[in-house]
């Protein structure tokens, strides 16, 4: 009996039986906010929950999702699905920072992000910190300006990170070699 189980395990390894679990585990999900919201209908008030979820793989991909449902678990699941649909890729430097300073605006929120030297860490607060950590940024300075709304701050951070450009992209746009940018 034990030999049969060992043979089955070996066959699974050859086929790559546990790949799906490995791929799922590399993605992290963090719930930023859960709110109870109401809708006024003919018979009274209808309660539901809104969940703001950040999804990232800590290797340069991150997304923000919002889910609404009658119970919290379903709302979080919908938020995760929405976050995976809205993934962006963040250009990271060798020191796990960003290439240049940038600002992002979403709704009434404005987020300022600045690159930092190695060893600085993630200096940010609230939803901005969560987005940056799940994106894989390890050295950065960030500041929330204007609004304190977690959803708008998360979206502003995503907007700031999505408009970042690397040196090679800028050189290609200008039609010059990368070495000429430093001169």
Image: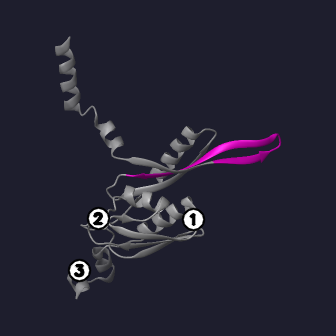
Q: Position of residue 33 (x, y in %)?
A: 55, 51
Inter-mark Cα distance, 2 to 1: 26 Å
Q: Position of residue 121 (x, y in %)?
A: 33, 64
Can you see residue 82? yes
Majority SS type along the magenta span: strand
Secondary structure state at the residue bearing disc 3: helix
Q: Residue furthest top?
A: 1
Q: Which residue is mark 3?
A: 178
**Is 107 above or below relative to 127?**
below
| N-terminal-most mark, 2 or 1 | 2
Q: Residue at x 26, y 68 (%)?
A: 118
**Is 182 above or below relative to 77?**
below
Taking depth in this image into account, of 143 and 111 the one nearest to the observer is 143
Q: Is the N terminus in the top left, top right, bottom left or bottom right quadrant?
A: top left
Q: Position of residue 136 (x, y in %)?
A: 33, 58
Secondary structure state at the residue bearing disc 1: loop
Inter-mark Cα distance, 3 to 2: 21 Å
Segment tinted magenta in the rendering: 36-56
Inter-mark Cα distance, 3 to 1: 39 Å
Residue 40 among magenta residues:
yes
Mark 1, Cα crowd under 10 Å, few <14 / some 14-19 / many 20+, is: some
Taking depth in this image into account, of 33 and 46 the one nearest to the observer is 33
Q: Is the C terminus in the top left, top right, bottom left or bottom right quadrant?
A: bottom left
């Amino acid at each position: 009996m034990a030999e049969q189980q060992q043979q089955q395990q070996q066959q699974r390894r050859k086929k790559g039986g546990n790949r799906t679990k490995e791929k799922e585990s590399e993605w992290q999900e963090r719930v930023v906010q859960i709110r109870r919201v109401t809708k006024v209908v003919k018979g009274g008030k209808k309660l539901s929950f809104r969940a703001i979820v950040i999804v990232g793989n800590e290797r340069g991909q991150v997304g923000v999702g919002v889910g609404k449902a009658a119970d919290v678990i379903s709302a979080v699941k919908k938020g995760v699905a929405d976050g995976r649909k809205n993934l962006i890729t963040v250009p990271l430097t060798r020191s796990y920072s960003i290439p240049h300073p940038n600002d992002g605006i979403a709704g009434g929120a404005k987020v300022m992000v600045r690159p930092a030297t190695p060893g600085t860490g993630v200096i940010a607060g609230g939803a901005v910190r969560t987005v940056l950590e799940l994106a894989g940024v390890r050295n950065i300075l960030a500041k929330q300006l204007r609004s304190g709304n977690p959803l708008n701050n998360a979206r502003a951070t995503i907007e700031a990170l999505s408009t970042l450009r690397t040196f090679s992209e800028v050189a290609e746009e200008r039609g010059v070699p990368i070495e000429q940018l430093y001169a």
